[in-house]
Image: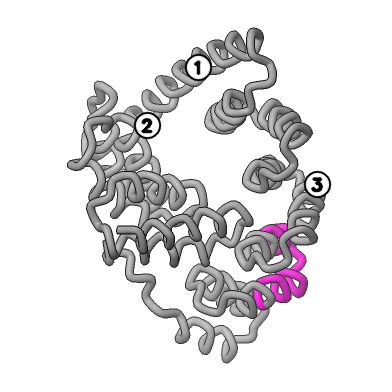
Amino acid sequence: DTNAYEIFRQGIEQEQTLQIFEARDLFRKAIESEPSNTGYLTHYVWFLHYHGFNEEAVNVFIKLLPATDEKGFLYRGLGWNQRMLGRLKDSLNSYQNVFDLQFSDENFQPAFEKIRWLLHDENKQKIKTLKQKLYYTPNDLSLKKELLNTYLDQGETDSAIQTGKEVLSEDSSDKFVHLQIARALLWVGKLQQSEQEYRMLINELPESAFLYFELGVLLDKDGRTEESLKALEKSLSIYPDAAVTKRKLAEVLTRTGNYEKAGKTADDIRAEGNDRL
């Protein structure tokens, strides 16, 4: 379907400029035309995973699993997103397809600890292998990006940020890598440095409602409520239908005591249609 391909290509272009909400709409539209296209579904599910759309990611992982032979990474992604949603037993059931786990319904914690250590060992070996490859091909950006992602998975944030900066020094057009640096700084509590990176991105990509949304989350975390509200409202002025932004805005408004506006914002949230796929 050439029309579906063109729509999906447009989604890729929007994704590259961090217009994440708009890209998601286009990906959904293309997949509605070709619901069994595993290439579209695979790209889309990891897009959802990386940008925090956990509920929809779970649904797409489940749809994709029977259609592919490479199930290991899909089960890992499914398990991670289920855990983020608090579905701990479902998460362990997914991880059981990858790891040998024993757990009881009364105590999931030992199994999650085992997963953490198994993943830690895997990532440690992967980092070593990627470094060896980069020793022989130091200008391979795809390897550097894989190393960046592995550092993030491993929680080695400083190394991830340094690797991300190396990538940007060679390819400043990769806005997702820049976003990963901003997020990594936020995760380790370096809010001022993270804010600087977000504002640099917004200066380059002023039409990204998603960047304003994530900046609003950061500012709220930093206790700067009024600035957070402005960022979230700016996000909604660009992309009015983002349920996640409205949810966050309603939450912040409630904490300020503006219950009437918070209620109206919450009432305006439309179901995201996570089961549409």
What is the distance, in whole Å, between disc 2 and disc 1 at their CAs? 21 Å
Other-residue count near label 3 (Cα within 10 Å), few / some / many at <14 / 14–19 / ≥20: few
Three-letter code for the amino acid on which mark 2 is drawn: Phe
List x then y, in percent, for residue 228.
Answer: 71, 69
Above or below for 112 versus 236: above
Relative side of 242 to 274, left or right: right
In this view of the protein, which residue sits in the foreground, 22 or 77? 22
Above or below for 205 versus 72: below
> Any magenta on residue 4?
no
Residue at 53% x, 11% y is 129
Pointer 1 residue: 126
Q: Main secondary structure of the magenta part?
A: helix
Residue at 63% x, 86% y is 258
Say which quadrant the C terminus sits in: bottom left
The magenta region covers 218-233
Residue at 35% x, 44% y is 42
Pointer 2 residue: 112
List x then y, in percent, for residue 140.
Answer: 63, 22
* Element marked by disc 3: helix
* Element marked by disc 1: helix
> Any magenta on residue 226?
yes
What is the distance, in whole Å, between disc 2 and disc 3 at their CAs? 32 Å
Pointer 3 residue: 193
Q: Earlier in the sequence, mark 3 or mark 1?
A: 1
Relative side of 251 to 223, left or right: left
Res. 187 in view: no
Asked where in the image residue 78 lies, by quadrant, the reply is top left
* Element marked by disc 2: helix
List x then y, in percent, for residue 71.
Answer: 26, 32
Relative side of 194 to 36, left or right: right
